[in-house]
Amino acid sequence: MRTLKFLLQKEFLQIIRDPAIFRILFIMPIIQLLILPLAADYEIKNINLGVVDHDRSAYSIKLVNKIIASGYFRLTDYSVSFQKSLHAIEQDRSDLVLEIPAQFERSLVKDNEATLFVAVNAINGVKAGLGGAYIQSILQDYNEEVRAQWIQYPRMDPQPTIEVRYSNWFNPNMNYRYFMVPGILVMLVTMIGSSFASNNIVREKEMGTIEQINVSPIRKMNFIIGKLVPFWILALTVLTIGLAIARLVYGIVPVGHYLTIYIFAGIYLLAILGLGLLLSTYAQTQQQSMLVSFFVTMIFNLLSGLYTPIESMPAWAQTITRFNPVSYFIDVMRMVVLKGSGLGDIRPHIVAMLGFAVFFNGWAILNYKKRSG
Amino acid sequence: MEKDKVITAKGLTKRFGDFIAVDAISFEVEKGEIFGFLGANGAGKTTAMRMLCGLSLPSSGEASVAGYDVYRQTELIKRSIGYMSQKFSLYEDLTVRENIRFYGGIYGLSDARIKEKTGLLLQQLHMEEQGNSLVRSLPLGWKQKLAFSIAIVHDPAIVFLDEPTGGVDPITRREFWSLIYAASDRGITVFVTTHYMDEAEYCHRVSIMVDGRIDALDTPERLMKEHDAASMDEVFLRLARKATRTGE
């Protein structure tokens, strides 16, 4: 225990003396949390719309106005021919072209039907899909209006329609930041846990000080605990800073308890620090450890459900996410922050995380040898 | 085992695949002795030393250090030895005092003892004013002397020094050796590797390793006489030229 005291003292002194660590520790979370959630937004707005209006009638103008008024579209191109508007798509000036045929008003009034043509630039699949869907629902709405104006409805609609009404739970305004900020926080904590810790140990290898430790009677466990505790505390500090920013800047107040978040984060960090430790036992230089932990955390983050929902991944990728500790923490964060889940609700997550912690640390301890072969 | 033999090795061997780094070396070191462990680069000195310190597992042979077996009792060996590696191994981002405190602490010295040792050590090295400076800011020679003093801060039975004076100026090397003599006088056995043959002459006994084997082992005077040489330099060159292995 006394040895541990000396190890921790030394570790904290070194951390405090390293200006880079402090800068990264405070500036990284602030920048990431201030910039990323604002920039990384799933909601598609500002779809550039090109219109080819061959009709130029009151109806066609009304339709275009209605589309613009929805707020999702921006009229960026108004061409006389489809060829010209296609050219605008090629130049990336518009994402979607709506072609209104010459006889639009006439056929609508006379024949009770009209045809429109919509061409979508599908390079960005999400944008294309959503843009197409938006415009379709606007057109449908327009259609209803026209029908209401011209046709006397029969008492019984020959074609019954089912209208679906949505009610958004837990995030009623579908505020994207509520979803994103907790996830980004997890990413930050993970980076500090894995790369910082592993780099720190590898640095001792590079400096040669680890040899001095190995030749001393320090117990393996003491050395490892002495390395884990400081970074455990650092990562929880960053989490605290992050939660404060989330609250002050984004007004995100967890529906559940902060304590639930901290308890899970504590266990999660044991697993992630174990992973960092494991990486450090294999890496010989800081460069190696940086590259490997960069690679690992990138895969973890991409497969974590932070950016894309796990449910829409192919089955094999979903299987991988079950072995990804990051996905559990993101899940827990969103559950606690948005739904107010308690410890009982996240029990499976806690059990899984304890498993990760035992696995990574066990492997690392087996692989850390004071004596080489 | 006789009480005054602090290191004994019998047929100690280390193989890395087909390569035999240390080939069945046998020797004994007595308590309080300054034992020079010479050899060209790649002769196997460091590997042999690492086995004795419990940093590397021997492939075969026997050895005991401070009465403990190098296979099974490495943790006990580690309590009884000090070690200064080729690579400088103090924490550069800690101050002189903090380094003393840390290494004293992990060897189980009490706080009072650490305090006492710190004062003594700074005085001995004439570094009272540098106590609170970062080790990074010290000149190399000072760092080396400090590293040595810290390696024996817990008064070990034996201290292993792996080329402790590499890159150090002659004056500092002199001072360094006076520290070694002081330690030896206190009963600490010194096991030292070096490339400087004038330093070899400071040792009580020296062994010369060639291609993983010990080719000569005696006092410097007798070795010079035996090889009809005027200096240890000549003895060393005569023996080391036979080597078939080249540098590490």
Image: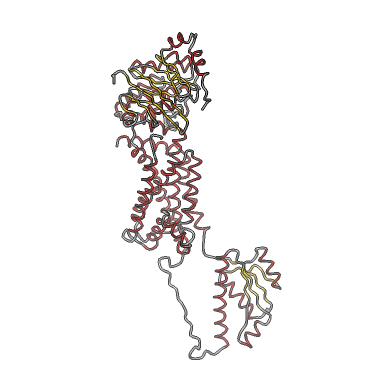
Residue A252 image-quadrant placement = bottom left
* Quarter that holds the C terminus of chain A: top left
* Quarter that holds the N terminus of chain A: top left
Please identify the residue farthest to the front as the structure is shown: B18
Residue A126 drawn above or below residue B175: below
Q: Nearer the viewer, residue A345 or A43?
A: A345
Residue B150 shows in the view: no
Q: Position of residue B116 (x, y in %)?
A: 32, 24
Count of numbered marks = 0
Q: Nearer the viewer, residue B45 or A14?
A: B45
Residue at 38 percent of width and 15 percent of height: B181
Q: Nearer the viewer, residue A41 or A289?
A: A289
Q: Position of residue A213 (x, y in %)?
A: 38, 33
Q: Nearer the viewer, residue A234 or B64?
A: B64
Display colour scheme: secondary structure
Residue B201 drawn above or below residue A167: above
Residue B154 drawn above or below residue A298: above
Q: Is residue A248 left or right of residue A95?
A: left
Q: Position of residue A155 (x, y in %)?
A: 48, 91
Residue at 57 percent of width and 65 percent of height: A125
Q: Is residue B3 left or right of residue A232?
A: left
Residue at 43 percent of width and 9 percent of height: B221
Residue B113 drawn above or below residue A120: above
Residue A206 shows in the view: yes
